[in-house]
Image (spheres, rainbow, N blue to C red):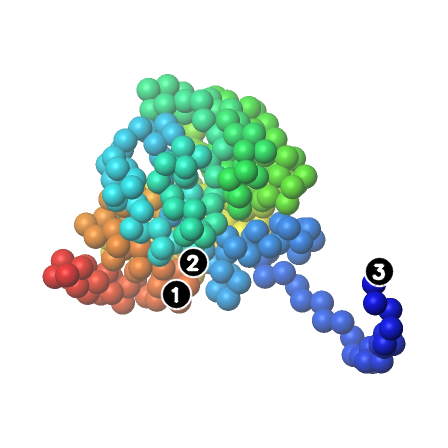
Amino acid sequence: MADLDGLKDGKDFGIGIPVKEKPFFLKGSNHLDWGMQSRLSRLFNPKSGRTVMLAFDHGYFQGPTTGLERIDLTIAPLMPYADVLMCTRGALRQTVDPTLGKPIALRASAGQSILTELSNEFISVEIEEAIRLNASCLAAQIYIGAKYEHNSIKNVSKLINEGMRYGIPTLAVTGVGGDMVRDARYFGLATRIAAEIGSHYVKTYYVEEGFEQVVNGCPIPLVIAGGKKIPELDALTMAFKGIDQGAAGVDMGRNIFQSESPLAMIQAVNAVVHELMTPEKAYQMFQDLKSDLTRA
Ligand code: R5P
């Protein structure tokens, strides 16, 4: 039986001190449930409000592309430097050390390859599996303007509906249909649709003209993909411009793991994203780290 002797009545109720109601740090996320906000706080650094997602999910339709032939050898050493790991459940179980404690953006769609129509995806991961894997978010492509646009919106909606039941956010990944022009108008349309259907954040691409309009027309956080491999200074410049114009981080793959020095590159990207380090300084940091690593 509970010991009821000596119970003391509470005295200090802080009368006159209002309860502090702190707004949540990510845009469009203030009214989400505690579990959602907790997972989003793992995906985005609450201090900077931003994230460096290391994307290595490409194999789900590209197979063993350059830099991902042996994820255990090439990507595993980079993982400690990322805020989030974006991967398939296969790569997760095969190559990610669970003791690392990194939040996982789980690729939850599949259904096509580089040999077929890219927009023809389905949801390949059950919500119970995502929970079993302790995923911090679920990700699938939204292919606006592509052949299977309708189905891709259904896919992302399914993730949102299932994720909402368990407090797991959904990342909508804008996949560009073959005939679409990659401009602010297109990404403005795609990211806004992603937000309106209830996604919690969205991955898009940086565009030189009108990126701020894309950011401001999208009421949820937006992260930019790296895209095809470009010279390191150009990739750091793109990341800087994206962040400076309001992106909440990067979801970067090839421009890190196909870099001359992936370990140096991920640290330089980190400095741009979280400290808004200028591209020139970040490139110098990349060069310095690269030569240190070569000497070691
Ligand atoms: C596409 O395969 C995935 O969504 C990638 O995770 C995304 O495109 C980011 O990778 P990258 O920076 O190589 O474009």
Q: Residue at x 36, y 23 (%)?
A: 113
As measured in the structure, the alpha-carbon distance from the residue carrying label 2 to the one carrying label 3 is 59 Å
Query: In the rendering, at what x and y percent does residue 76 appear?
Result: 31, 47
As measured in the structure, the alpha-carbon distance from the residue carrying label 2 to the one carrying label 1 is 7 Å
| Residue on which the image places disc 3 | 1
Q: Nearer the viewer, mark 2 or mark 3?
A: 3
Q: Could you tell me which secondary element the residue under label 2 belongs to?
A: helix
| Residue on which the image places disc 1 | 276
Quadrant position of the N terminus in the picture: bottom right
Label 2 sits on what residue type? Ile
Judge by depth and name the residue closer to the eye, 158 or 145.
Answer: 158
Q: Are marks 2 and 1 in contact (CB under 8 Å)?
A: yes
Q: Does the residue labelled 3 lie within 8 Å of ligand 1?
A: no
Label 3 packing within 10 angstroms: few (<14), some (14-19), many (20+): few
| Residue on which the image places disc 2 | 243
First reached walking from the N terminus: tag 2 or tag 1: 2
Q: Judge whether 252 appears above or below 289 on screen.
A: above
Label 1 packing within 10 angstroms: few (<14), some (14-19), many (20+): some
Label 2 packing within 10 angstroms: few (<14), some (14-19), many (20+): many
Label 1 sits on what residue type? Leu
- Quadrant in which residue 90 is drawn: top left
Label 3 sits on what residue type? Met
Q: Are marks 1 and 3 in contact (CB under 8 Å)?
A: no
Q: Residue furthest top?
A: 116
Query: In the rendering, at what x and y percent does residue 124 appear?
Result: 50, 26
First reached walking from the N terminus: tag 1 or tag 3: 3
First reached walking from the N terminus: tag 2 or tag 3: 3
Judge by depth and name the residue closer to the eye, 257 or 89.
Answer: 89
Quadrant position of the C terminus in the picture: bottom left
